[in-house]
Amino acid sequence: SRAGKRIKDLYRPVNDILGKVLAEHAVDTGPLRQLAAIRHFDLFATTTPDDLLARALDAVRFDGLRQTDEIEYAPKLPTDRRRDIPEVMSSKYAAVFYVFGKADVSPFYAIHDEDVLEFAYTMQAGNGPERIFSQLRSRNLLLIGCNFADWLSRFFLRLSNSERLSSDQRNKKEFFVGHKGPEDQDFTVFLERFSQDSRYYPTDARAFVAELYRRWSERNPAASAATAVTDVTQPAPSAELSASGTIFISYSSDDIGAAKKLFGDLQEIGGDVAWFDKTA
C-alpha cells in the first residue's frame, strides 16, 4: 500500500536526521559517563537507536578508542551482522545491546509503535543473541528511565526471567527507576501483586544516576580514580531537544516543505517525534 511504502522510506531520512542532530547539537552525556565509570557494570542495554552510550563507555574506559562491543538486535538483521557476547568475558570487557536496533539506512531499528511490537514478538520467539538473553535472565537488572507502555514493561519483565514472576523459584531482582504518569500506576500495582522481587523508584533518573555514581565512588576510591568523570557538565540541549521522544527533526529553511511532510508521516504512523523546529 501507499502508506506502507511511505513507512519503508522513512528509515534512511530518520537515520540521517538523527546523525545530523547529534553532530550539530550539544548533548548532555554526563549521566551516561557516570554509568560508564561504574566498573562493576559490564553489560548495558539501550532502548534508543543512537550510540551515545557506547561513546560514553569508550571515552571513560578506553581513552576514546572504539572498544565497546556493540550488539545489535533486529527481527531481520542480516546474518553477517548478528553477533553475541563472548562465552568468556575479560575483566575489561564492556558491551552495549541495542534492544530495538541501531540507527541505520535500512529498517533494522524501531521508529514507530508497530516496529516495537514486531521486535517484541520476534524476541520472545528466541530470535536473538542467546548469550545476551541468558545474561538478562540470570542477572539482577537495573532499568533507568525506561518508561515503556504498561504492556511492554510487563512483557520485558517476563522475558528477562526464566520463571514466572510470581514463582518462589525466582532468584533475581529488577529495579525500575524513573517517573511514570498516573496512567501507568497499574504497573506498580502489578509489581506489588505478582513480582515482589521487583522494585520501582519514582525518582528523577539523572538524580538517581548521580547519587549511584557518588556512592560507588565512595566505596571504590581506587577504581573511581582510574575512571574519574571529569566532563559531566556539557552544554545542555535546548528545551525542545530535551523533550521526551526518540525522533528529532532538524533542517535548513530551504527544506521546510520536506521537513513538514516527514513530520506528518511520522505522526501518522505513530512515530515518537519529540522535536520539530517550526521556527527554522
Image (cartoon, helix red, strand yellow):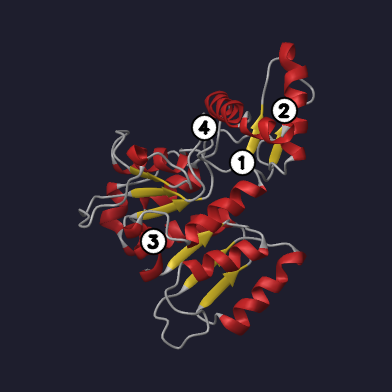
Residue 129 versus residue 33 in the image, above or below: below
Check disc 2 and report the residue beneath it.
262
Q: In terms of secondary structure, where does tag 2 sit?
A: helix
Check disc 1 and report the residue beneath it.
111
Check disc 3 and report the residue beneath it.
133
- Is there any visible trace of residue 19 in the rendered image? yes
Answer few, some or many: residues within 10 Å of disc 2's Cα (few below 14, many 20 plus, some between 14 and 19): some
x then y, percent, for residue 256: 76, 18
- Earlier in the chain: of badge 3 and badge 4, it is 4
Amino acid of disc 2: Leu
- In space, the residues marked 2 and 4 are separated at their CA atoms by 17 Å
- In space, the residues marked 2 and 1 are separated at their CA atoms by 13 Å
Q: Quadrant of residue 64?
A: top left
Q: Quadrant of the N terminus?
A: top right
Amino acid of disc 3: Phe
- In space, the residues marked 3 and 2 are separated at their CA atoms by 35 Å
- In space, the residues marked 3 and 1 are separated at their CA atoms by 23 Å
Residue 261 versus residue 252 in the image, above or below: below
Residue nearer the viewer, 142 or 216: 142
Check disc 4 and report the residue beneath it.
106
Q: In terms of secondary structure, where does tag 1 sit?
A: loop
- In space, the residues marked 3 and 4 are separated at their CA atoms by 24 Å
Answer few, some or many: residues within 10 Å of disc 3's Cα (few below 14, many 20 plus, some between 14 and 19): some
Q: Residue at x 69, y 41 (%)?
A: 271
x then y, percent, for residue 10: 63, 30
x then y, percent, for residue 21: 59, 27
